[in-house]
Image: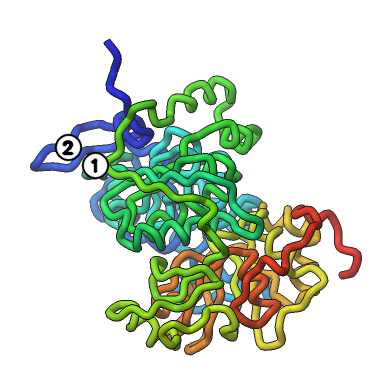
Amino acid sequence: MTSQPQTLFDKLWNAHLVTPETDAAPAILYIDLHLIHEVTSPQAFAELEQRGLPLRRADRTKGTLDHSTPTLPVGADGQRNYVNAEARAQVDMLRANCTRFGVELFDYDSPQRGIVHVMGPELGLTQPGQTIVCGDSHTATHGAFGALAFGIGTSEVGHVLATQCLLQRKPKTLAITVDGELAPGVGAKDLILHVIGVIGVNGGTGQVIEYRGSTIRALSMEQRMTVCNMSIEAGARAGLIAPDQTTFDYLRGRPRVPADFDAAIEEWKHFHTDEGARFDREVRIDARDIQPTVTWGTHPGQVAAIAANVSTGDGDDAKARDYMGWDAGAALAGRPVDVVFVGSCTNSRLSDLREAASVLRDRHVHPRVRMLVVPGSEQVKREAEAEGIDRIVRAAGAEWREPGCSMCIAMNGDIVGAGQLAVSTSNRNFEGRQGKGARTVLASPLTAAACAVAGEITDPRPYLTTEPARIAELETA
């Protein structure tokens, strides 16, 4: 008897189901990997201590420092430049909790420390077929590997620490199929911004999105992570891309993958949507419709191609225009820019920095613009510096920083000033997200670098180079 076709999400859910949900209670799911950082874990560990509970599976919990960590180099006095005592205390508390409960922590002295959603995949901790949670909404990033990955609240962090399980209601499914070839100068960030513009900032609410189609299959793993990362910006619970040879090639040889890697691949190949499986909803998008895209408003659904104009709508659109200082129907291109940020868990990987460097090479950041380039991990930083990307960035007049979340959430002192307009490769453009009164335009690394050079919002395509994206050396410092 043939079993009913299942979606990738169904397979992941069923493989980890401890107790099915009922009308009276959510399902109980087993969690394979629990990632923690310094911001959302202190209260959870305190709850364990208050209740006298042990940590259920220390081996399945991994910690890193990222949100509150300064990106300025260590000072001459050997001290780190924390923005305030609270940030330092958060880092010290995570270190103490990991020591007390036996959790592996990727601390400052670790060559693998980095943004939680960058270093997990780099290490091979993130694997197809897993359930992955973290007290961070952009845990959806890990879905690029065919893992069911989503953010949880602090109380849920405590629940997972104590039980290695989580209470969940089963979401619905949404298939987003993108077919066709992306044009030169159009990347994964443009793709996901376009998708959010099509389905709306609440278009994925109560659903897990599976990204499918020839365009998605052609993306690199780093590009797939960018797409899945911003699933939450469409309101989705998680984003998924089925694992394939691209996934397996990326993971092979990473430090934390299974010892019998080929046997693991045979298991991972099971995690795909079966022929004939049905989704609760499906959306199709033609890649030819996607252009270099940015946000113009105060949420990620307020997007437009750079060549287009600001919305003339009323309601939320009018409120967003007032905050951003746009006139209805105004051109996006040509708007002066004050700050450019390349980094965050969305776009701080090596390929992202290569894109930005390809624009900055032999050019200079506009005198009006302050530009920060922040690698997503110590590994990204090492690899970028080995290619000379740091020298290209500095030669162009931008700042090359230490790894961390940095200006994405402005918790560590890297902020956009009140009234300033920032072009950012991060994932959220909410009011004040990058600093009180700051105004944010989300963009790809290519677009962000082009805007830094031009000093205004501009299409990156005139800045494209025929040189290889990989930069082997820089002739002048």
Asked where in the image residue 474 lies, by quadrant, the reply is bottom right
The residue lying at 59 percent from left, 51 percent from top is: 182
Q: Which mark is residue 21?
A: 2
Instruction: Judge left or right: residue 241 versus residue 395.
Output: left
Residue 458: x and y in percent read 62, 75
Q: Is residue 464 left or right of residue 239?
A: right
Where is residue 31? Give x, y as percent: 35, 39
Please identify the quadrant where the C terminus is shown: bottom right
Q: Left of 198 or right of it: where is 268?
A: right
Q: Nearer the viewer, mark 2 or mark 1?
A: 1
Task: Specify the quadrant that holds the N terminus.
Answer: top left
Nearer the N terminus, badge 2 or badge 1?
Answer: 2
Going 80% across and 61% down the picture, which residue do you hit?
Answer: 388
Q: Residue at x 47, y 36 (%)?
A: 242
Residue count near mark 2 (Cα–Cα under 10 Å), binned few <14, some 14–19, many ≥20: some
What is the C-alpha distance between the residues marked 2 and 1?
8 Å
Which image quadrant is residue 431 in? bottom left
Determine crowd level at label 1: few under 14, some 14-19, many 20+ residues with C-alpha closer than 10 A: some
Task: Report whether residue 77 is seen.
Answer: no
Residue 286 appears in the picture as rendered:
yes
Residue with the mark numbered 1:
170
Residue at 38% x, 57% y is 232
- Give the label on residue 297, or none: none
As drawn, 92 above or below 372:
above
